[in-house]
Image (cartoon, grey):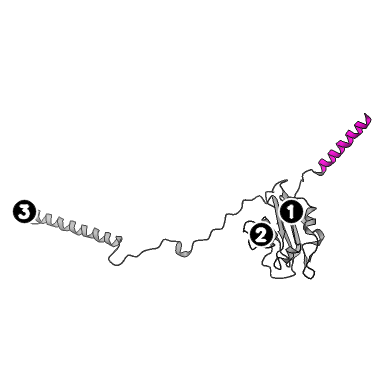
Amino acid sequence: MIGATILHLITMAVLITAAATQAPPTKYINHTVGDNAGWFFNFTTNTTATNYSSWAASQTFNLGDYLIFKTSSNQMVIQTYNLSTFKNCSIDDSSYNDTFVYNGGNTVFNQTLNIIVPLTIQGPNYFFSDASDGIQCQHGLAFDINVSRSLGLPPSLNQPLPPPYREPPSPDSAYPPITIPAKGEGAGNSGFKNGASVQVIACVSLFALLAVNGGDRGGIF
């Protein structure tokens, strides 16, 4: 009996410990990519500063968390939800709404950068550098993570997406084309002339009628 009670207590302790370790987080977390190694690539040896896939496997990622890339302008930071883009180590065939380049266009090398990336999409997220025509990515400067819902997005990140871009109308299409009729033609001129003709005919008829009546009476007035 005593042995059964002790076994029961041990089982309860194990369950409580497991529940405590699996308790949902109560705050959002900033993850420094690669920890102290940062996000770097050695061009001489074609090696990365650390194993980023192993680093990612040791972390738990949730909506609202941030990834902090301590890097330089010698590396790129690309986030994509497109597995093909990730596997190809290239953004050439990516879409504007599934792949984001965070330090593209930087032409100054060896410039220290801290790039902060929010995790706003639940599910698979892929990160890589396509610098040097994808060589960095091909040699390990890449990792994938799975983002869980947990607390959900904070209000600061839970904003509606901007409307899709629409090409503004050209100056030629801003107003309908204006057609200028040929001289003596067109509805406006024709209408005016017809109206004037009616007025002239009406006046002539009136004077003729007055003349007839006046003649009978010895004068117009």
**Comparing labels 1 and 2, the label whose residue is closer to the camera:** 1
Q: Give the range drawn in magenta.
A: 1-20
In three-dimensional space, the C-alpha distance between marks 3 and 2, rounded to whole angstroms, equals 99 Å
Q: Residue type at mark 2: give it.
A: Phe
Quadrant of the drawing holding the C terminus = bottom left
Q: In which quarter of the image is residue 78?
A: bottom right
Horizontal arrangement in the rendering, residue 217 relative to residue 123 (left or right):
left
Q: Which residue is drawn at 18% across and 58% down?
A: 201
User: Cα distance, mark 1 to mark 3?
Assistant: 112 Å
In whole angstroms, how far apart are the C-alphas of marks 1 and 2?
16 Å
Along the line of sight, the residue nearer the viewer: 103 or 210:
103
Pick the residue in front: 164 or 18: 18
> Alpha-carbon neighbours of circle 3 within 10 Å: few (<14), some, or many (≥20)?
few
Q: Based on the picture, tell me whether residue 16 belongs to the magenta stretch.
A: yes
**Residue corresponding to mark 3:** 216
First in sequence: mark 3 vs mark 2: 2
At mark 3, the secondary structure is helix
Q: Is mark 2 on a helix, strand or loop?
A: strand
Q: Is the magenta stretch mostly helix, strand or loop?
A: helix
